[in-house]
Image (tube, rainbow, N blue to C red):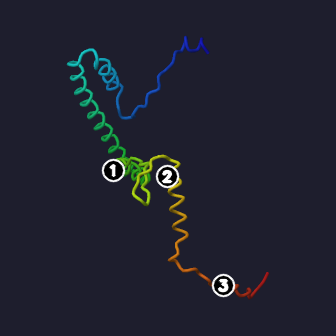
Amino acid sequence: MGAAKGTIGLKKSVRKKTWISDDTFQIMAEKREMKQKNPARYKELKTLVQKCLRRDKQKQLGDLCDELDTANQRGNMRCLFRTAKSITQTFRSRLHCIQTASGRNFTEQEEIADRWREYCVELHNDEDTPELDHQFEREPPRLRQK
């Protein structure tokens, strides 16, 4: 294992957005280095990174619109609607918070699960709902049996 690390080395995994170009990532890395060393250069790089990110995002949107056009020309509705949905959908963060009946917020998973369990029990044990005592009859026998 040590020889493999020495020969190949370790690659740091980076969560990369697909639409950000490699040039922009290089500028971002340089910006991080300059944060402590040279604040004036850091400010310049910060504005440059923002410009590059805007440019990359516009390029990605343009590519998606081209994909929409080609899908529409081919009659590929599945690809057309999937691409349109990816462009128009808004970001929704997942909230891991729930309120109790008294108004207190729970954020822990166990507390949230207990609260849902309590809510479901309350829902099913509601005394206002009348009990259904229907006597159901069996279906009549078949007219013709095989």
Give me the C-alpha separation between circle 1 and circle 2.
Answer: 31 Å
Q: Residue furthest front?
A: 102
Badge 3 or badge 2: first in the primary sequence: 2
Q: Residue at point 52% right, 66% down? A: 122
When the figure is inspected, residue 45 is found, relative to residue 85, above or below; the finding is above
Mark 2 element type: helix
Badge 1 or badge 3: first in the primary sequence: 1
Badge 1 or badge 2: first in the primary sequence: 1
Amino acid type, label 1: Thr
Taking the image as shown, residue 99 lies to the left or right of residue 47, namely right
Q: Residue at point 34% right, 21% down? A: 29
Give me the C-alpha separation between circle 3 and circle 2.
Answer: 40 Å
Mark 3 element type: loop
When the figure is inspected, residue 103 is found, relative to residue 57, above or below; the finding is below
Q: Residue at point 50% right, 62% down? A: 119
- 70 or 10: nearer the viewer: 10
Mark 1 element type: helix
Q: Residues within 10 Å of mark 3 (few under 14, many from 20)?
A: few
Q: Nearer the viewer, mark 3 or mark 2?
A: 2
Which residue does the numbered mark 1 point to in the structure image?
A: 88
Taking the image as shown, residue 135 lies to the left or right of residue 91, namely right
Which residue does the numbered mark 2 point to in the structure image?
A: 112
Marks 1 and 2 close (CB-CB < 8 Å) = no
- 89 or 104: nearer the viewer: 104
Disc ID at residue 136: 3
Q: Residue furthest right?
A: 146
Q: Nearer the viewer, mark 1 or mark 3?
A: 3
Marks 3 and 2 close (CB-CB < 8 Å) = no
